[in-house]
Image (cartoon, rainbow, N blue to C red):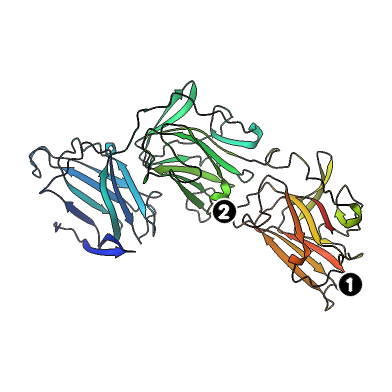
């Protein structure tokens, strides 16, 4: 609509074959359907999808105004009602589609919606692509609230960092509904169990910024949800975790985050009128490259009414989360088929150093349930040298070692193993040295994982650059940027 002072220009375009409205020079734009007003009395939500190339960080805003002309169907006829909602970061995003699925109840000034006649979009986003603009009615089934409590967690308390659960001692949470979200939250009990009830949920910001959570030793994030709303397509539920980084400040330059979208077809899947346990490996939050200073949990989507319980991080590896509770599995290779550098079941060859003076790692001899183990800390790389008596592994077929780390295994975490042969002259840099390094992450076989013993039983043929192995003199292990803490056991060659 050509309204006075509106600078907006409209183009009808296609994006990947889909019809889309493109607004440029947008300060505000009026979208009118006054000749045939809309009766949205039976609808529960207003929906639109937007995409913008513009910055959406604060103080940028995007506003949605709905206007009802009343029974007389005339603007300013005395029975008009209206309400405008303002959206900001983190709901808004740059260069990605954002779905605004808004409960009509949030438009509190819109006292009638039987004669809707205008939609007005405005704000600081000068270029906005718009699609899928509609009113809808949410499903609800026959049950509006749970009659049974969420299942009680079974993770050992020592393995858990809990935000909200009767089963554990909870860490401080600053707010369960931040001032920048649009959800309402209430504390109630379901069958005697403390539960959070969110209503008018488009997105809710749960913040624990004054005392951030160190989940670096954790492997999973868990929460239980129950909703009366329809979970059939296109309904989704989203979970975002945000780490503020070492400076502990939002927008400090070292923030990382990742959002997962769940629906009725994902694993885990959402469902109506039953408790759903969402047990998610932290590795699935691939953009969450650090978890040492978690400060925000943001839940959003199409489930406007949501009961929530048992929100916690945990490690599945046993022990305290920072050290193994059980020793590495005992190797079963015949002693005659083994050349061992470090393993209780075998006689070990001479190793000159487990941390060379040219590396930056620290190493300690510890015991895990009575079993000798090497503990590396501050591991960027560690040089293990046996140069005074090099190893002839010519007849061996495999290199074997086991590690355990409490550190996150999600990218960019990698663990590298390098073998170096000094050649017949037995000297470093003598002209006949050969070497090869292998890299492991959460997607390799074996996969890097936190809180569990990992067995590397690697065919020596995989070290393709190690064309001779009659004078193996160095083993170099690398964790950069992490794992930083690594327990090591049963380091050997075998056939």
Image coordinates of residue 207 in percent, x first then y, are 47, 40
Q: How crowded is mark 1: few (under 14 residues within 10 Å), some or many (20 or more)?
A: some
Relative height, residue 161 to residue 131 (above, below): above
**Residue drawn at point x = 41 percent, y = 49 percent:** 90
Relative height, residue 81 to residue 442 (above, below): above
- Among all residues in the image, which is located at the extreme top? 192
Q: Which mark is residue 289?
A: 2
Image coordinates of residue 54 in percent, x first then y, are 35, 60
Side of 428 relative to 293 (left or right): right
Relative height, residue 360 to residue 46 (above, below): below
- Among all residues in the image, which is located at the extreme bottom? 431
**Residue drawn at point x = 81 percent, y = 58 percent:** 355
Q: Name the residue under label 1.
A: 426
Q: Residue 132 carries which label?
A: none
In the foreground, 18 or 32:
18
In the foreground, 334 or 166:
334
Relative height, residue 179 to residue 274 (above, below): below
Image coordinates of residue 437 in percent, x first then y, are 73, 66
**Residue drawn at point x = 45 percent, y = 23 percent:** 189
Side of 368 relative to 44 (left or right): right
**Residue drawn at point x = 54 percent, y = 45 percent:** 294
Q: Can residue 359 be seen in this view?
A: no
* Quarter of the picture holding the C terminus: bottom right
In the foreground, 121 or 235:
235
Q: Disc 2 on helix, strand or loop?
A: loop
What's the distance in space between the residues labelled 2 and 1, CA to CA?
Answer: 41 Å
């Amino acid at each position: 609509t050509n309204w006075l002072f509106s600078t907006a220009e409209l183009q009808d375009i296609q994006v990947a074959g889909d019809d889309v409205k493109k607004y440029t020079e947008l300060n505000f734009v009026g979208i009118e359907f006054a000749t045939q007003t809309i009766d949205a009395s039976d609808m529960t939500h207003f929906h639109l999808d937007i995409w913008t190339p513009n910055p959406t960080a604060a103080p940028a805003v995007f506003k949605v105004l709905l206007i009802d002309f009343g029974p007389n169907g005339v603007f300013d006829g005395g029975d008009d009602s209206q309400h405008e909602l303002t959206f900001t970061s983190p709901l808004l995003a740059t260069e990605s589609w954002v779905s605004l699925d808004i409960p009509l109840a949030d438009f509190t000034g819109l006292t009638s919606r039987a004669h809707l006649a205008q939609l007005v979009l405005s704000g600081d986003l000068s270029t906005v692509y718009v699609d899928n603009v509609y009113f809808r009615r949410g499903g609800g089934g026959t049950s509006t609230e749970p009659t049974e409590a969420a299942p009680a967690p079974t993770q050992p308390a020592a393995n858990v960092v809990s935000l909200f659960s009767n089963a554990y001692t909870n860490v401080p949470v600053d707010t369960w509904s931040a001032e920048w979200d649009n959800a309402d939250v209430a504390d109630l009990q379901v069958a005697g169990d403390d539960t959070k009830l969110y209503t008018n949920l488009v997105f809710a910001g749960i913040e624990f910024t004054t005392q951030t959570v160190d989940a670096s030793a954790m492997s999973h994030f868990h929460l239980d949800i129950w909703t009366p709303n329809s979970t059939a397509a296109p309904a989704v539920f989203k979970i975002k975790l945000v780490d503020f980084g070492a400076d502990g400040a939002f927008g400090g330059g070292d923030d990382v985050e990742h959002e997962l979208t769940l629906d009725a077809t994902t694993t885990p899947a959402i469902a109506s009128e039953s408790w759903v346990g969402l047990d998610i490996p932290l590795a699935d939050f691939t953009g969450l490259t650090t978890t040492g200073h978690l400060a925000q949990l943001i839940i959003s989507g199409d489930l406007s009414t949501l009961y929530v319980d048992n929100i916690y991080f945990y490690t599945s590896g046993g022990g305290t989360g920072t050290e193994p509770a059980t020793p590495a599995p005992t190797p079963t290779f015949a002693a005659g088929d083994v050349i061992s550098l470090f393993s209780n079941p075998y006689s070990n060859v001479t190793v000159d150093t487990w941390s060379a003076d040219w590396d930056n790692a620290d190493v300690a001899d510890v015991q895990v349930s009575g079993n000798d183990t090497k503990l590396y800390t501050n591991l960027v790389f560690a040089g293990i040298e046996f140069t005074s008596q090099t190893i002839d592994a010519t007849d061996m077929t495999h290199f074997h070692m086991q590690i355990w780390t409490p550190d996150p295994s999600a990218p960019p975490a990698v663990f590298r193993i390098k073998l170096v042969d000094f050649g017949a002259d037995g000297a470093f840099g003598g002209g006949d040295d050969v070497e090869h390094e292998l890299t492991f992450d959460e997607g390799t076989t074996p996969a890097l994982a936190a809180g569990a013993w990992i067995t590397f039983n690697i065919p020596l043929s995989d070290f393709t650059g190690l064309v001779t192995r009659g004078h193996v003199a160095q083993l170099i292990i690398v964790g950069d940027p992490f794992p930083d803490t690594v327990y090591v056991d049963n380091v050997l060659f075998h056939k």
